[in-house]
Image (tube, rainbow, N blue to C red):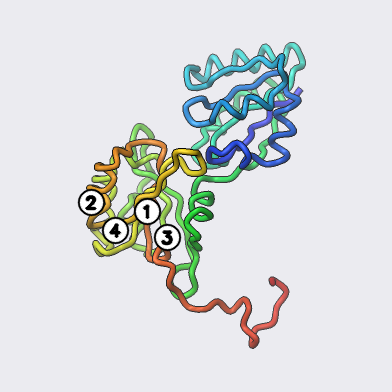
Amino acid sequence: MKVYFIGAGPGAVDLITVRGREILSRCPVVIYAGSLVPEAHLAFAPETAEIFNSAVLTLEEIRAILTSARDRRLDVARLHSGDPSLYGAIREQIEVCDELEIEWEIVPGVSSAFAAAARLGLEYTLPGVTQTLIFTRLEGRTPVPAGEELASLAAHRSSLAIFLSVHEIGEVTRRLLEVLPSTTPVVVASKVSRPDESFISGNLGNIVEKVRRAGVNRTALILVGEALAGKGARSRLYSGEFSHGYR
């Protein structure tokens, strides 16, 4: 018996990996993050599968489901949005598995940050602009450690992908403006890869009003940085003067 933590991707049902879909199709127990993972994924679970929506469950209730599955020797597909390693709260669930002596495996998924870049034609790491992408969030019920405040991270002038924070877009921009100019490009990517996806482009000086007018306040990612402008130096990767084994 095994628990599989599967990244279901950003939303589109075909952006789950082949491995994730195959595992889902044979697991008799499925726990999915109902507030973020579209129910369309459940069509690929066995017809007789026991399905649980974790949006209404506590960790203790999830533990009870895993205990029952273990006792009956039934594999569990645990569907998370995006990639489980980002804001997925999988560590505490893995600890439960370890306590219950249940084998587990993580199946990576496509993050909304990468799905957004694909839709927008972005390269976060442009030569001459930045070679760094930071994934972060504004503190909320979950605090951020000292030194990881938005202004501190933004001071690196790297690309930023800010999760779980669009409901506080005013506070996000206020902190970023402490170290970045108001002309810094911003894109708010909402419900990326879903039929109702939307992208709001602007800069730190005008994005708040644009987002508020659009009524976007959840399930959105805030992208920030000069790389969003799409202007950078030519890379050395395909230079005729540069030979290596990474092409």
Q: Which residue is mark 2?
A: 174
Amino acid under label 4? Answer: Asn
Q: Earlier in the sequence, mark 4 or mark 3?
A: 3
Q: Earlier in the sequence, mark 2 or mark 3?
A: 3
At x 25%, y 42%, the residue is 213
At x 23%, y 57%, the residue is 205
Q: Which residue is mark 4?
A: 203
Front residue of 161/14: it is 14
Q: Which residue is mark 1?
A: 187
Q: Earlier in the sequence, mark 3 or mark 1?
A: 3
Could you tell me which secondary element the residue under label 3 belongs to?
strand
Q: Earlier in the sequence, mark 4 or mark 2?
A: 2
- Residue most extreme to the front: 195
Q: Residues within 10 Å of mark 3 (few under 14, many from 20)?
A: many
Amino acid under label 1? Answer: Val
Q: Residues within 10 Å of mark 1 (few under 14, many from 20)?
A: many
| Disc ID at residue 179 | none
Q: Is residue 41 left or right of residue 231?
A: right
Q: Are marks 4 and 3 in contact (CB under 8 Å)?
A: no
Q: Which residue is mark 3?
A: 159
Cα gap from disc 2 to disc 3, whole angstroms = 17 Å
Cα gap from disc 4 to disc 3, whole angstroms = 14 Å
- Percent across and percent down for residue 242 are 65, 83
Front residue of 43/225: it is 43
Q: Quadrant of the N terminus?
A: top right
- Percent across and percent down for residue 26 are 76, 25
Q: Nearer the viewer, mark 4 or mark 2?
A: 4
Q: Residues within 10 Å of mark 4 (few under 14, many from 20)?
A: some
Q: Residues within 10 Å of mark 2 (few under 14, many from 20)?
A: some
Q: Nearer the viewer, mark 4 or mark 3?
A: 4
Cα gap from disc 1 to disc 2, whole angstroms = 16 Å
